Amino acid sequence: MTKSAQGSAEPRNLVRTADLPEPEMPGQQVSESAYRRLRHMVVLATATVSLLPLAITVVINYMQFHEALQAEAVDPMARLTLNTKRSLELFLSERRSALTFLVHDRPFAELCDRAALTRIISNLNRSLDVGAFVDLGVIDDDGAQLCYSGPYELEGRNYSDQDWFHEVARRGTYTSDVFLGFRNSPHIAIAIKHDRPDGGFYVLRATIDAEMLSEQILTAGLQPTDDVFLINREGILQSPSRHYGEILGQVPLPVPHYSPTVEVVELEDDRGRTIFMSSAHIHISPFILVQIKPAREAMGRWFSLRSELLAFLFVSAGLILAVILWGSGQLIRRMREADERRTALYHQVEYSNKLASIGRLAAGVAHEINNPLAIINEKAGLLLDLVTVGPETEHKLRLVTTVDSILRSVQRCKKVTHRLLGFARHMDVQNETIDLENLLREVLGFLEKEAEYRDLTVSFRVEDDLPTVVSDRGQLQQVFLNILNNAFAAVSEGGQIEIVLAREGVDNIAVTIADDGVGIPEAHLQQIFDPFFTTRPGAGTGLGLSITYGIVKKLGGTCRVESEVGRGTHFTIVLPISREG
Amino acid sequence: MDQLRLLFVDDEEELVSAVVERLELRGIDGVGATSGDEALHFLRESSFDVVVLDVKMPGIGGLEVLRTINRRHPEVKVILMTGHGSAKDNEIGRRLGAVAYLEKPVDLEDLLSTVDQALNPEGGGPDGR
């Protein structure tokens, strides 16, 4: 028969539902650490894509500015070094040319005449505008000074054991380092070798005061902290220096390698100062011109620009980071709220579905029971009819009372099944006219046994001529069942629950469910409508009131709660008399 | 008034037989049918004043039988009866012209008063809703 087939259909459905694979857990709460991880990732990714280009730009700017400003500082320095190098070279070559001219122009005999030498010196010193020679001497190929004119007593000296003599004999010309020599005063010597027709040679040697050389070094445009001087290839000072020692002292700086042009390097000196050193080798001499400029002076503009650049970098990086942190915080907060809303919604749907399933199951059971109940009812009725019309027997009265008792039991069963059916029937019906008092009494029917068992008193106070409301019966049943359940949980044995129905304003009806239970602490009152908030961990999902709140809002109503610890709680649901929309 | 002729249709044979016997004890000519087909057959064979119809039956359901009665025997009053009080069925039944709608288990006295009201609507009182 179809009926019995139908009866087994429900449980089979349930089994099938339970066998379904787990859904994707939309209702699962996302953990705190997951949000933290997500936030770290967002911050890291955003910071990388925004700070990296900034950092690259700043680094490029840094390098370009540094290069430009260094060039700006170094170029004039190199120019000055080059000019000084040229004038020094001119100075030395002028003097060498003069000597070369002499050895070619004058016969050896004249050069060996002291008076003639003295005249030549005075003429030369007159023609070369910056002064010329201190003395002049002629030395034969044995190294002996044949003739000498000058302020020192050097005639007859023998130079054959001196390096410079061998050098000039070998190469033809020679320009010496600064040295003290027999006269014990710093000077340089320029010597020219000339071959004689008899196969021998002689050397014309002139000396120049080292001071004269120093004067050739251009000092115009030099700052007090700058320095310019000459050194030889061993690093011995050939002219006085402002900061690196006296003449003939060892300069505490590395000797520049040979280069045909001006070289500028940045290095740290013996006092720990960062300096620019520009250097140039002086042609046909052992001299190296060195110019020193402290980097601090040269790069003054660079240092201030660098500070500005770094300040810009840090300020903008700070701002960007602050915005990223703030933004990601907001983003994650919103996400979290959305997740929570979604979870709550999911639970609400799940809850409603569960309720609907229970409703359907209850309806199925009730329906199945109603049929045999109808048979019992009719058979018992028939029995009663037969006994009533039949002859008087000694058991007649007992039979009648027994059948009556059966019929009363059937009536009780009928009440139960009808209540179940009533509950299920309104599961998906929307917007009907509802008498709130009836609805509340219907819901209370479910809690009747508990009330009786715990000796609870539930009383009604209903305003006269209270209008019906247009609303969703099933949803309202859920709302009131939930609040009544909470009220039942709050009161102790023998507790009182009062349900007050009254108009609120013109368009609303307020349903207040007041209990004299434990009450809700003020700190919890703000949170009781929040999803997952519960004061009885383990006893529920903490979703009941949040779902209630959601339903009431959906129905166009409002919820409010007043409570005092130890005195009880008043839950008020305000519903519009007619639903709009 | 002639003897009242009532056709009681339900797929539970036990219920049908008990009701028919109880009707007879009350002097009502009760006929039982355990399916829609059987009910329509009886309706073709003889005439009835009232048909009490279970909505949910295997084969031809109560509402289907009701439509056929409306077409072929418009003078017959129909009272619907169901084990689950679906508001939708009630609504459809009323639109199809059922005079009343009862929820199982039906008390016989209630049924008879509903029948009485269906046959004598001008007799006053509630219309059996």
Image: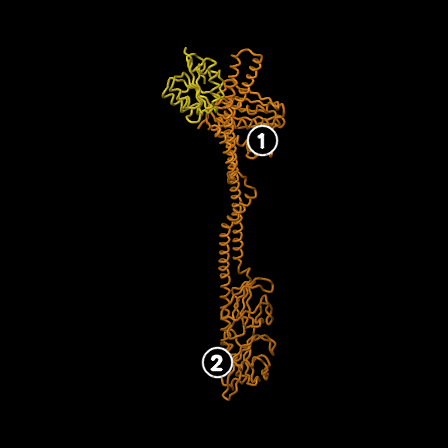
Chain colours: A orange, B yellow
| Position of the C terminus of chain A by quadrant | top left
Q: Is residue A15 visible?
A: yes
Local crowd at mark 1 within 10 Å, few (<14), some, or many (≥20)? some
Give the amino acid type for the residue marked by disc 2 in the picture: Phe
- Image location (x, y in percent) of residue B2: 41, 11
Compared with A65, A136 (above or below) is below
Residue nearer the viewer, A538 or B111: B111
- Would you name the residue on which mark 1 appears? A525
Q: How many marks?
A: 2
* Left-right relation of A82 to B74: right
The answer to the question of whether label 2 and label 1 lie on touching residues, with beta carbons closer than 8 A, is: no
Check the image and name the residue furthest to the bottom.
Answer: A198
Question: Marks 2/1: CA distance?
Answer: 116 Å
Chain letter of the residue carrying label 1: A
Residue nearer the viewer, A414 or A98: A414
- Would you name the residue on which mark 2 appears? A101
- Image location (x, y in percent) of residue A219: 53, 66
Circle 2 SS class? helix
Q: Is residue A552 visible?
A: no
Give the amino acid type for the residue marked by disc 1 in the picture: Leu
